[in-house]
Amino acid sequence: AKEQGRSTYRFYTAEQTRISRERFELESGLRRAIERDELRLFYQPQAACANGQLVGVEALVRWQHPERGLVPPDRFIPLAEEIGLIGQIGEWVLNTACAQARQWAQAGHPLRVAVNLSSHQVSQDKLFDTVKGALNRSGLAPSLLELEITEGHVLKRVEECIVELHRVKTLGVSLAIDDFGTGYSSLSYLKRLPVDRLKIDRSFVEGIPDDHDDISIVATILSMARNLGMGVIAEGVETPAQIEHLVAARCGEYQGYLLGKPMPPDALQDWMDRHRA
Ligand code: C2E
Ligand code: CA
Ligand code: CA
Ligand code: CA
C-alpha cells in the first residue's frame, strides 16, 4: 500500500507539473492575446419561437491561439478572472460587439447583440462607464445592446450590484439573466433587479419533451416571466421536438444548434442571407 501511495504521489506531481506549465503558458499567452489581436467574437443567432424570425445574436468570445487553435471561453475566462485580465477582455468584448452590431444596423440588419458579463465586471462601479464608452464609441443604439449576467454574479455584493445595474439600465440597454434556474436565491432579488429577459438554462431544455420535471420547470419560468412582464429565451434548443414544445408553451425566443451555432461575423452574414431566403 505504501509503495502504491508513493507511485501515486510521483504520478500526481508529474501531472501537477504538466498542468502548472500549461497554465503558465496559457497565462502569459493570454496576457498578450489582446495586443496580438488573437481574441475573436462569434455570434449565435436568436429567433422568435412563433415565426423563426431573427431577433438578435449572442456574442461569445474565443481565443485564436497561434498553436492551440480556437480556445473555448471555458478554458480561459476563469483564468482571466483569476489573474485580473477579465476587465480588459470584457471591455474588448463590449467594444467589439457594439461596433459589429452598429455595422449590421447600418447595413439594414438592426440586431440586438447580447454580451456576457463576468462577475468581476458586474460588481464594479466601472461598469456604467465601460458600457457608456462602448455605446458612444460605436454609435450603437442602446436598445440594441443586451447585457447577460448570471444569478451567481449578483450574490457576492448584492447591494452594490443592484445599484450599479440600475445605473447601467438608465443608458437604455437591456438586461438578461443567463442560465436562469441554475443558481440560487434567484427569486428574492429578481424583483429588485431591472431584468428584461430570462434565459432558460440549457439543462432544462435538454429534457424536453420527455422529462416531466424539466417540462414543469420550463412552464413555471414562462408563467413567472409573463406575470413579471419579462421576456424569455430558451437556450440550447437542438431538436424540432423541443421547439415544437416551446412554441406550444408560448415561449418568446430561442437559441441553439437547431437554429445556428455561434459563428464568425461573415458566416453570420451568409447565414442571414440564407435564413431570409
Ligand atoms: P453561456 O453564456 O451559457 O453561452 C452558451 C454556451 O452554450 C455557448 O458555449 C454556446 O456555444 C453553447 N451552445 C449554444 N447553443 C447550444 C446548443 O444547442 N447545444 C449545446 N450543447 N450548446 C450550445 P461557449 O461559446 O463555449 O461559451 C461558454 C461560456 O463561456 C458561456 O456560457 C459564457 O458563460 C462564457 N462566455 C462566453 N463568452 C464570454 C464573454 O465574452 N465574457 C464572459 N465573461 N464570459 C463569456
Ligand atoms: Ca450567455
Ligand atoms: Ca447560458
Ligand atoms: Ca452556461
Image: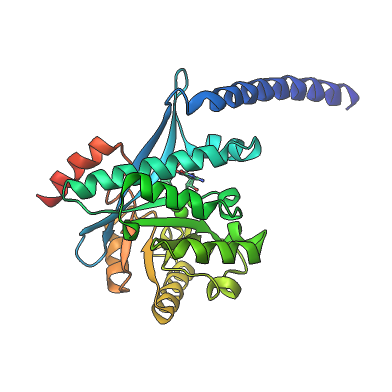
Vertical relation: 275 (above or below) 185: above
Classify residue 54 as left or right of residue 96: left
State the image coordinates of residue 142 (x, y, percent, origin top left).
35, 58
How are the colours assigned in the image?
rainbow
State the image coordinates of residue 79 (x, y, percent, origin top left).
61, 35
Q: Of 123 and 131, which appears nearest the observer?
A: 131
Q: Of 108 and 150, which appears nearest the observer?
A: 108
Q: Of 177 and 247, which appears nearest the observer?
A: 177
Identify the residue shown where x is 46% and y is 17%: 67
* Residue 209 visible (yes or no): no
Furthest toward the bottom, the residue is: 227
Image quarter for residue 190? bottom right
Quarter of the picture holding the N terminus? top right
Furthest toward the left, the residue is: 277
Image quarter for residue 103? top left
Vertical relation: 221 (above or below) 39: below
Query: How many numbered marks have been drawn onto this rendered protein structure?
Result: 0
State the image coordinates of residue 246 (x, y, percent, origin top left).
32, 67
Classify residue 2 as left or right of residue 219: right
Vertical relation: 127 (above or below) 222: above
* Residue 45 visible (yes or no): yes
Furthest toward the right, the residue is: 2
State the image coordinates of residue 173 (x, y, percent, origin top left).
39, 60
